[in-house]
Amino acid sequence: MSTTVIKPDFETAQKHFIFTQEHEDLRESMEEWVKNELYPHRMEWEETKWPDWAMERAGELGYLGLCFPEEYGGQGGDYYYSLVRAEALSHAGSGGLGMGFAVQTDMVLPPIEMLGTEEQKERFLAPGIQGKRIGCLGITEPGAGSDVASIRTTAKLEGDEYVINGSKTFITNAARADFIVLVAKTDPDAGHNGISLLLIDIRDEEGNELPGFSVAQNLEKMGMAASDTCEIAFEDMRVPADSILGEVGKGFYHITWELQGERLVAAAGSNAGAERLLETSIEYAKDREAFGRPIGKFQSIRH
């Protein structure tokens, strides 16, 4: 039996078991940008939604392509850069903004990078990294929630085109998106093996909805009002057969892979948002006075 005991290296220069100095440098620069250019608009955007220029500005600074290959305009970093980005965006004071960005960077673009053809990557991934084209992810349906196996939206192959019919709901970025990664049934009788992903344009260059696609309604929410969340509909929308993303019939497995990274980013962003709330609460407890002293001096509030 080995008697070797592995002990922590307290002399290591890396202070965090995940984040390196490069990650921390990014955090510092991105937080500064968020606080200077995004945070001042937080209340305004709760009324008007966040503007497209914010996404394009992030692309210009390289913040959208942190984890994507350099040949498509990315920075070639590891997955942990996504966590840094999610945490830095918490300083914007707008959960809706963080949600809209996360859909682009951690839900829509990763499956395109992993599964897309070269033509699809040039057409969707590269401009998505630049922030010049915005995407959305079409999974959730009125009768199925996010249960991928129970979706009803269909894409039937007719000649060299797929004909799409169905509806999706709670789709973030749908009111502004240029394209969508759509989960649909290409073979309704094949169960999990009958689900495919399609990568399709839903608006033209002028921002008009393409034939067969429509935003049924822009939903009102209790929170995250800065992000648009919509119900969308497809009625005999025809798209080329090469719109398939990945393999036909493997959409359930493709999207299950994508959801893993998305959920960890959501957790990191939520935890960072809670940290911002704690910081704000502590600051308030120091400034607010009652009975001649800051309320933070009272035992219950200190607890």
Image: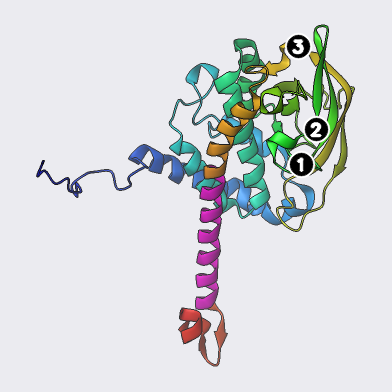
Q: Quadrant of the N terminus?
A: top left
Q: In terms of secondary structure, where does tag 3 sit?
A: helix
Name the residue tied to disc 1: 144
First in sequence, mark 2 or 3: give its number.
Answer: 2
How many numbered badges does the structure rendering display? 3
Mark 3 crowdedness (10 Å alpha carbons): few <14, some 14-19, many ≥20: some
First in sequence, mark 2 or 1: give its number.
Answer: 1
Name the residue tied to disc 3: 241
**Looking at the rendering, which quadrant does residue 216 occupy?**
top right
Q: Which residue is drawn at 83% across and 40% down?
A: 231
Residue type highlighted by circle 1: Ala
Left or right side of 137 for 47:
right
In this view, the residue in front, 273 or 4, is 4
Q: In terms of secondary structure, where does tag 1 sit?
A: loop
Q: Is the magenta stretch mostly helix, strand or loop?
A: helix
Q: Residue at x 62, y 31 (%)?
A: 255
